[in-house]
Image: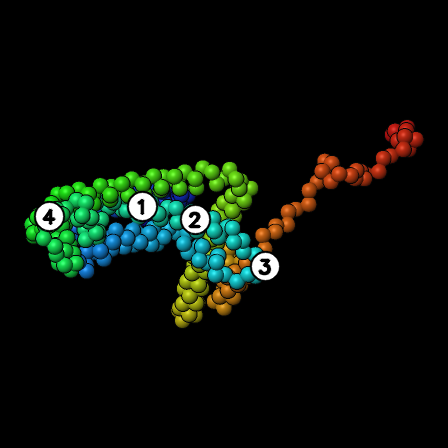
Amino acid sequence: MDKFRMIFQFLQSNQESFMNGICGIMALASAQMYSAFDFNCPCLPHYNLAYGLGILLVPPFILFLLGFVLNNNVSVLAEEWRRPQGQRGKDPAVLRYMFCSMAQRAMIAPAVWVSVTLLDGKCITCAFCTSVPVETLGNTSHPGLSQGEMKRVLARIPCKEIYNGQELIANEVAVRYLRCISQALGWCFVLLMTTLAFLVRSLRPCFTQAAFLKSRYWSHYIDIERKLFDEMCAEHARSFAKVCIQQFFEGMSTDLASARCHPPRKAPADVGEAAEKLLGITDQGTMNTALKSWHRCKPPLHLHPPALPSGNGWAGEEQPPAHPPVPRREMAAYYSRV
């Protein structure tokens, strides 16, 4: 049990590195999922586009939501956004910073999926096979077909075993054409994501350094405050349970002692320490009121430091000495008497 507690504390203290590791694992998992995915294009005119774009866009959306679910700061952001105003104002810049930080990590796995999918080319080939320019790549001397028949033939391009339009356009030519376009889109997407990541990570702090530092500081404060509040509540609940159980057994011991004429035992010292940690909150109603007060009206972010020493010149003005100086005549008369 202690080992698990140490691991949990280590993950809490290194939460940012842990979340970066989780995002990297999700990115690798998304690439492995696509390589293990059995892609089967329906090869039907009215279903190819929906199937191809669905495989391209739906899994990244799921991975994006999963990245938010695995991030512990989602609940912190939701709580800070929905809490009442109270005595502490809410800074929209801090909320935006927290959301952008989580979105950046959550975008890694979807970006990997889209990049791998586009570079592979199967989805684009399935989705846009009916849009191949037959006039440019196909056989122009082939007898004319109706628009519906031509789409039905072109929709079978991804299914090489059932394709029967070699006279219209060669299957290999159409597949290579669509795969070339898909790979070009994939590399453009990788370049775009890399450029955006560079701009966000490198240039944003340069232009708004003061606002960036302020938002980052208060986002860390909100996260740490919640962790410390949870730890304080856990410690209070542990002390509350210890005292409650001790009082129960003390009552049972008193009843047994009165029945058997044995003096009750003295309460151990650790129970007294647990009672001191309750801080005067000793019943369920008071605890519920305290928790509601914390949610509805958090204390203002204005601490009252103790008064600084006045003899060091920090106050900017001279202070009177603690003891008035003794005249020289009185000191001489005192020493002559001694």
Q: Amino acid at mark 3?
A: Gln
Q: Amino acid at mark 2?
A: Cys
Image quadrant in which the C terminus is located: top right
Q: Is residue 178 left or right of residue 171?
A: right
Which residue is located at x 8 percent, y 48 percent? 167
Under circle 4, the secondary element is: loop
Q: Percent position (x, y) of residue 179? A: 20, 43
Q: Nearer the viewer, residue 86 or 188?
A: 188
At which x and y percent is residue 243? 45, 60
Give the x, y percent position of residue 107: 35, 47
Q: Which residue is mark 4?
A: 141
C-alpha span from label 3 to label 2: 26 Å
Comes first in the chain, label 3 or label 2: 3
Which label belongs to residue 87? 3
Label located before the other in sequence (1 or 2): 2
Q: Cα distance, mark 2 to mark 4?
A: 57 Å
- Which residue in the protein does label 1 denote? 111
Cα separation, mark 3 vs mark 1, equals 41 Å
Left or right relative to 205: residue 13: left
SS for callout 1: helix
Q: Secondary structure at mark 2?
A: helix
Report crowding for label 1: few under 14, some 14 to 19, many 20 or more residues within 10 A (C-alpha). some
Where is residue 290 drawn, in percent x and y?
52, 63
Q: Considering only vertical position in the picture, is 261 above or below 238?
A: below
Q: Which residue is mark 2?
A: 100
How far apart, in angstroms, are the residues tagged by discs 1 and 2?
A: 16 Å
